[in-house]
Amino acid sequence: MKDAVEGVPAPSAKLAGSLLFAQLPTSPRVSRSDSRPEGQTGPPPTARATPALFCNSQNGSVAYSGQRASVIDFSSPGKSAAARDQTSAVHSSGGDVLRVSVLGSGTSMGVPTPGCHCAVCKSSDPRDNRTRPSILLSYSGHNVLVDTTPDFRFQALRANLEHLDPVLFTHSHADHIMGLDDIRPYNLKQRCAIPIFASGDTLAVLRRTFAYVFEEAPPGSTVPLVELREITGPFDIFGLRIQPVPALHGPSPVLGFRAGAFAYLTDFSSVPPESKLLLAGLDHFVLDALRYTPHPMHSNVEQSMALVDELRPRQAWFTHICHDLGHQAANDRLPENVRLAYDGLTLEVDL
């Protein structure tokens, strides 16, 4: 497996405010939850500080440990023998293909948009039915989710998502975080916390928005069990190198992610030069293209086409699409190497 950005120089540390390109540290996380399966009788366990648990749900089996980083390699220097063994197992298990599933390709209001009767909202083409934007990265029996949209429960059922490993967050807007509570079935099934990777600013918003997750849980209640990890640079998940790609969403910093020759960059209005270096040599690039007309917070079709022409990925896919763009009509206007993404689109990328 090759590094995602082999041979690409690191961008400057001043990029996107506080985001520094350094090794990802491991930091403590305290979570409280009644994790009993529904229907189990007897008093709930006493709410208490819970050690960080990470699921290894490969091939349907669940292994979990209170030893942080015993089953996942978060940074190269000083990793434990168990983490090295886990990484080696991933490399030797034939997991040389990254499967990317587009769970949602729509804008924050979704398509059809409530109360709208335009041609796209009334379209009979199923590709014009767009839930809020999210993708799933699957490899070697692992599933890495990018963003928990308000549609996450529906998206997970539609994709037959049997287990969930980490969640990566691009930023903290409602259409990207409000489905967080719906990870609870995976906590119960896998009997462990779900690690969450995000910038420091996004983690702070998650703590405020989902304060009940981090407070004492009432007896008998079930809340999401999570482990927070701040993204400060490239990191590894089960042997897959994830490269954060900072960008701007209007005035706000956001993150895209690169894994191998695939990159995902939603909700952006501009990409700094340092980040463009991280997007060279892509096979598949899924990027924001909200509509034809300009928008202060999002890239439009013209701007995204200019970025594609500059970066020259083998194939580009537009996402976070509003009801201004009908699927077939828009594709008819685009070059062959650029297409609209759609809910259910699946890509495969060699690692």
Image (cartoon, rainbow, N blue to C red):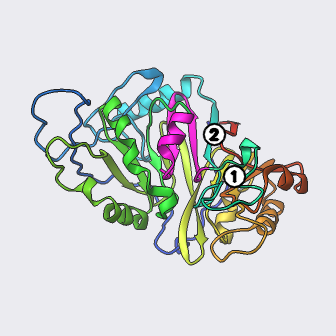
Q: Which label belongs to residue 286?
A: 1
SS of the residue under disc 2 = strand
Q: Which residue is identified by label 2? A: 100
Q: Can you tell which quarter of the image residue 124 is in?
A: top right
Between residue 215 and residue 196, name the one nearer to us: 215
Residue at 55% across, 23% down: 92
SS of the residue under disc 1 = strand
- Left/right placement of residue 327 relative to residue 103 reads right
Residue at 69% across, 58% down: 321
Q: Are marks 1 and 2 in contact (CB under 8 Å)?
A: yes
Eyeballing the image, is 87 above or below 321?
above
Name the kind of residue labelled 2 in the image: Val
Residue 198: say if magenta: no
- Left/right placement of residue 163 relative to residue 36 reads right
Give the image location of residue 24, x and y in percent: 42, 54
Lower position in the chain sequence, tag 1 or tag 2: 2
Name the kind of residue labelled 1 in the image: Val
- Residue 3 appearing in the image: no
- Residue 286 appearing in the image: yes
Q: Give the range drawn in magenta.
A: 131-158
